[in-house]
Amino acid sequence: MNYSYLIPNWFFGFDIAMEILFAVITFITAVMAFKINSVTKERKIKLFGIAFLLISLSYIVLGGLNFWFVNLVSSGFRQVTIDNVQLIGVVSLYLYMVLFASGLITLAYINCDVKKGKIYYLLFGLGLLVIAASLHKLITFRILSVFLLSFISYHYFEEYLKNKNKKAFWSLIAFSLLFLSCVDFIFSPFYYQAYVIGHLLELVAYILIFGILIKSVKK
């Protein structure tokens, strides 16, 4: 049987609540970015808002997936499976991967410092093609996310070295935590601790990103 990830019973419910919280935080982040864009008309801010809107939608789908398609088993764990869920569950899992990957691809595109739509099309197409062509789609999706987040984190690392500003530093920390969470999730089919730690890392990362945007608005 092909397991997607293991969830300890004591954490079940908390994970769904955290995913809904992530959806709310990333949605508010997107709305705030759109409001800033309405004043500045800066293209990067608009794309930043679109990226976090896609990520917010992905967490809404994931929260719903975990709520409806989790099977209770022995040994104190719940196991989310791909093989035996209904079609809507499989579609929801794929939709989550597409939305989240699209958000990260958009963030990576912003940091490429190019304005050509062809580059975005290439990044978007190749990213989704890699997932679609894989036999182990969830693991491939996690590896793709790790790659994209490493690129985004490195961008903020370079920006911090160049400008020494606090915004770049905290952005580096936030996206590095998301990078670590995705690395951690790769092992979630085998160790339930990876699933728990991954969620906690995401929580801290999104709180930091939200705080960065709040400070940007206040300036």
Image (cartoon, grey):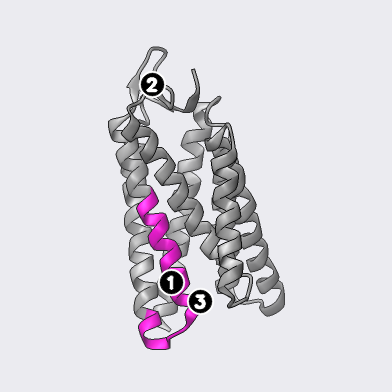
Q: Is 121 positioned to the left or the right of 5 in the image?
A: right
Mark 3 or mark 1, earlier in chain: 3
Badge nearest the viewer, 3 or 2: 2
Q: Is mark 3 on a helix, strand or loop?
A: helix
Mark 2 — residue? 84
Badge nearest the viewer, 3 or 1: 3
Position of residue 184 relative to residue 27, above or below, is above
Mark 3 — residue? 44
Q: Which of 183 and 127 is in front in this view?
A: 127
Q: Which residue lies furthest to the top in this view?
A: 74
Residue 87 point in image, percent of width and height = 34, 31
Q: Is residue 37 magenta?
A: yes
What crowding class fits label 2: few (fewer than 14 Cα within 10 Å), some (14-19), or many (20 or more)? Answer: few
- Give me the residue at 42% from left, 13% from top: 75
Question: What distance separates the C-alpha of mark 1 from that of mark 2?
Answer: 41 Å
Residue 137 point in image, percent of width and height = 54, 36
Badge nearest the viewer, 1 or 2: 2
Q: Which amino acid does label 3 sit on?
A: Lys
Q: Is 28 positioned to the left or the right of 43 in the image?
A: left
Magenta region:
36-58
Q: Which amino acid does label 1 sit on?
A: Leu
